[in-house]
Amino acid sequence: MTSQPKIYVAGHTGMVGGAIVEAVRAHGYENIVTRPRRELPLDDRAKVDGFFAEARPDWVFLAAAKVGGIIANDTGGADFIRENLLIQTHVIDAAWRHGAQRLLFLGSSCIYPKQAEQPIRESSLLTGPLEPTNSAYAVAKIAGKEMCDAYAKQHGFDAFTAMPCNVYGIGDNFHPEHSHVAAGLMRRFHEAKMEGRDSLAVWGTGKPLREFIFSKDIGEACLFLMEHYREGGMINAGSGQEISIRDLAELIREIVGYEGAVTFDSSKPDGTMRKLMDNSRINALGWRPATDLEDGLRQMYGWFLEHGDRGRSGR
């Protein structure tokens, strides 16, 4: 290594990858390499291997993934499991074979069992059935975590998994079918406001509870873990900020300025009723998020107004 590690961020055009790049630069790291998907499709093994053979990064942040909300996961499971397995397999293997010193793989809180004890500890993984609507994506993410563990055990590769809760914020994907809940609601409330609609229906009962973390905070958390975490395996990286979907919808409605009625369509699926993670391990290391939910959503809406509904692929 030189005086600074050479850092590769896979998925830098996505919300989380972009936040990692921002955090890395803000902390004075200058030797950063990225590649857009058109130049480096991570589902192409030969191209991934060629990139790592040439670039030889020291640190790898694997934030690239095919992601989506409850509708996309429920209807496009084959795409989610295929693409994510390919991306993860190619990047983790090539990083090890070409001498990377550390690799952080981004998981997802949806990998935990649907009925996991709350708050969810890392040890809850694989102790019960998954939420059916996103099981294909969850299985892919579990495979990535297991691959990191296996390469660490067999080859001594310092690869580990960071487990974020629901991420929202700057650079989010506002696609009407592929977005996650916060971005999807924000776009729908904005459109209802612009079109002067009298009411807007939200999927589900509004009762599920979700933990949200701002994109900038998860970027900072990933860099913090790369610098300080040495235990391997996986570690939760959440905010501890929990809110019901009903209250989230009301908060976003207020931020957007929509004055119509809000209803809830209980014929549509709720998904897992609660997903609050136990973040005691990362907190004990000295990290906590800096952004509260309302402030983060206001920053997110400002970004949306400036950039429109342009989504970013994350790959």
Image (cartoon, rainbow, N blue to C red):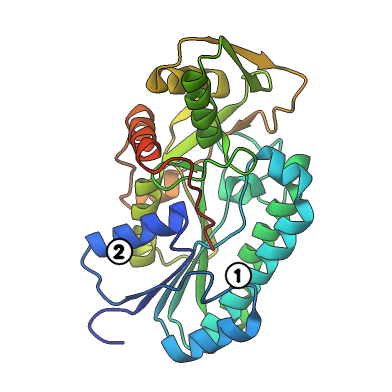
| Residue shown at the point (53%, 59%) measured from the top left | 234
Q: Is residue 58 above or below residue 11?
A: below
Instruction: Using residue 9 as the reference point, say whether residue 149 is left or right of it.
Output: right
C-alpha gap between disc 2 and disc 1: 25 Å
* Disc 1 element: helix
- On the image, the x and y values in percent for residue 92 come to 57, 75
Q: Does the image show residue 8?
A: yes
In this rendering, which labeled residue sits more in front, label 2 or label 1? Answer: 2
How crowded pointer 1 is (Cα within 10 Å; few <14, some 14-19, many 20+) is rated as: many
- Residue 24's tag is 2
Please state which of residues 162 and 65 is positioned toward the viewer in this rendering: 65
State the residue position of label 1: 149
- On the image, the x and y values in percent for residue 85 come to 69, 66
Residue type beneath disc 1: Asp
- Label 2–label 1 contact, CB within 8 A: no
| Residue shown at the point (33%, 66%) measured from the top left | 227
Residue type beneath disc 2: Val
| Residue shown at the point (41%, 72%) measured from the top left | 34
